Image (cartoon, rainbow, N blue to C red):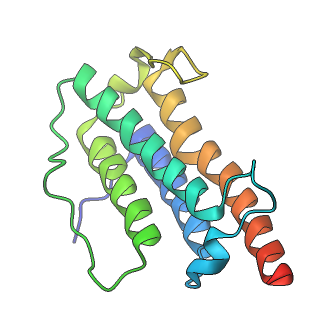
């Protein structure tokens, strides 16, 4: 059984994993539904999910480099039968979970600066992770839910 993470790190982890689960509930197994776009300028649900996974992975990698934490990115377990979109999201949150497990509550207070194109330039590690692993993912999960619903109606 995995060690339970207490304190602010535990709260952060549980918030992030809740956001992950909310994203996962909106992924449809029909790849045509996930690729559907309302117009040529819009993003598909698949593209939004790739954005969520990439953004979280990049932020976790950046913070881990700043704090000299090894996330063992070469060793991410993947289920071969799983939907690739589900695998992408799960892999990003494995990095997030590893980061939360390696941080101390004091490290959450460290200031960090994200490189462009991030709109959040500077804040504490805790704030950045809450925004990216939690709020950002939940925001995009809402977009995915609407796109999937519209795709099913239009197809």
- Residue at image coords 73%, 63%: 37
Could you tell me residue 76's position as x and y percent? 21, 60
* Residue closest to the eye, 27 or 98: 27
Q: Position of residue 16 (x, y in %)?
A: 50, 51
- Location of the N terminus (image quadrant): bottom left
- Would residue 23 be found to the left or right of residue 107 on screen? right
Residue 94 locus on image (x, y percent):
32, 56
Q: Is residue 35 left or right of residue 16?
A: right
Q: Is residue 106 visible?
A: no
Residue 113, placed above or below residue 20: above
Along the line of sight, the residue nearer the viewer: 124 or 140: 140
Residue at 69%, 63% (x, y): give it: 144
Compared across the picture, whether 41 is left or right of 120 comes to right
Front residue of 44 and 22: 44
Q: Position of residue 33 (x, y in %)?
A: 67, 78
Answer above or below: position of 79 versus 61: below
Q: Quadrant of residue 36?
A: bottom right
Q: Quadrant of the C terminus?
A: bottom right
Residue drawn at (40%, 34%) of the image:
59
């Amino acid at each position: 059984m995995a060690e339970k993470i207490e304190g602010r790190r535990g709260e952060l982890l549980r918030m992030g994993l809740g956001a992950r689960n909310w994203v996962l509930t909106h992924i449809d197994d029909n790849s045509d539904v996930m690729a559907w776009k309302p117009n040529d300028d819009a993003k598909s649900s698949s593209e939004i999910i790739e954005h969520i996974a990439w953004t979280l992975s990049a932020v976790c990698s950046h913070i881990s480099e700043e704090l000299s934490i090894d996330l063992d990115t070469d060793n991410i377990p993947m289920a071969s039968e799983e939907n690739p979109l589900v695998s992408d999201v799960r892999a990003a949150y494995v990095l997030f979970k590893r980061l939360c497990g390696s941080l101390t509550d004091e490290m959450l207070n460290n200031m960090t600066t994200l490189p462009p194109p991030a709109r959040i330039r500077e804040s504490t590690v805790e704030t950045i992770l809450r925004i990216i692993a939690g709020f950002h993912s939940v925001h995009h999960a809402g977009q995915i839910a609407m796109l999937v619903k519209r795709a099913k109606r239009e197809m």
